[in-house]
Image: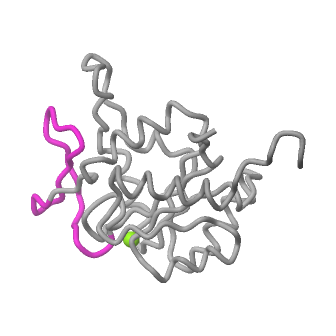
Amino acid sequence: MAHRFPKLIAFDLDYTLWDLWIDTHVTPPFKRNEGDLNRIVDSHDREIAFYEDVASILHRLRATDVTIAACSRTHAPKLARQALTMILVPPPVGHPDASPTPAIEYFDQAELYPGSKLTHFKQLHEKTGIPYSEMLFFDDERRNREVKKLGVTFCLVPDGLDNVNFEAGLEEWRSAHPEPVHGEE
Ligand SMILES: [Mg+2]
């Protein structure tokens, strides 16, 4: 089947989902202006928002049983969590009357702390029981490809996540993990 998904898809935050380093580029307190979707601002009015295609990718995954994880080496985990809590994801296209949803609600797991991402993925594995071969990770930084050592499929997105590289990552995972032929194990 062409549209298999891995059991877990993880996303880095800084420069993968949004266009900044949450631990150095913004200053709390954050606020959300009335009516704003996919947008909060810091105390200097600097915007924190997901890249354009992120909302639709989250909607797409929510319609599957994929476990969604955030995985960041940030030195400001509380701020990252706060931003995810405050950013409202607009409803899916075609459902204009649905309520916007706080971004944090899309993430089943969040591993947010400094250090090697090997630790983040070992934690994800421990908490979910999902094998590394069923994990796909999107990240803008090449150094984090070390998670491949565990068996995680790594998709580098140097300019952030979009529909094109999301699809490419899925394809890469599918071709690395072909479905067993019926009758074989
Ligand atoms: Mg990053």
Assign the N terminus to one quadrant of the image.
top right
- Quadrant in the rendering for residue 25: bottom left
Q: Residue furthest left?
A: 45
- Front-lying residue, 101 or 177: 177
Where is residue 161 drawn, in percent x and y?
35, 58
Overall secondary structure of the magenta section: loop
Q: Which residues are magenta?
A: 23-46
Question: Residue 76 vs residue 88: left or right?
Answer: right
Outermost residue toward the top?
Answer: 97
Find residue 118 and report its horizontal and vertical position in percent.
Answer: 63, 75
| Residue 12 in picture, x, y percent from top left | 44, 63
Q: Tell me which corner region of the image, top left, top right, bottom left or bottom right, holds residue 182.
A: top right
Residue shown at 35%/67% (left/top)? 14
Q: Which residue is depicted at the point 24% across and 62% down?
A: 28
Q: Is residue 185 above or below residue 60?
A: below
Query: Toward the viewer: 51 or 110?
Result: 51
Q: Is residue 80 left or right of residue 146?
A: left
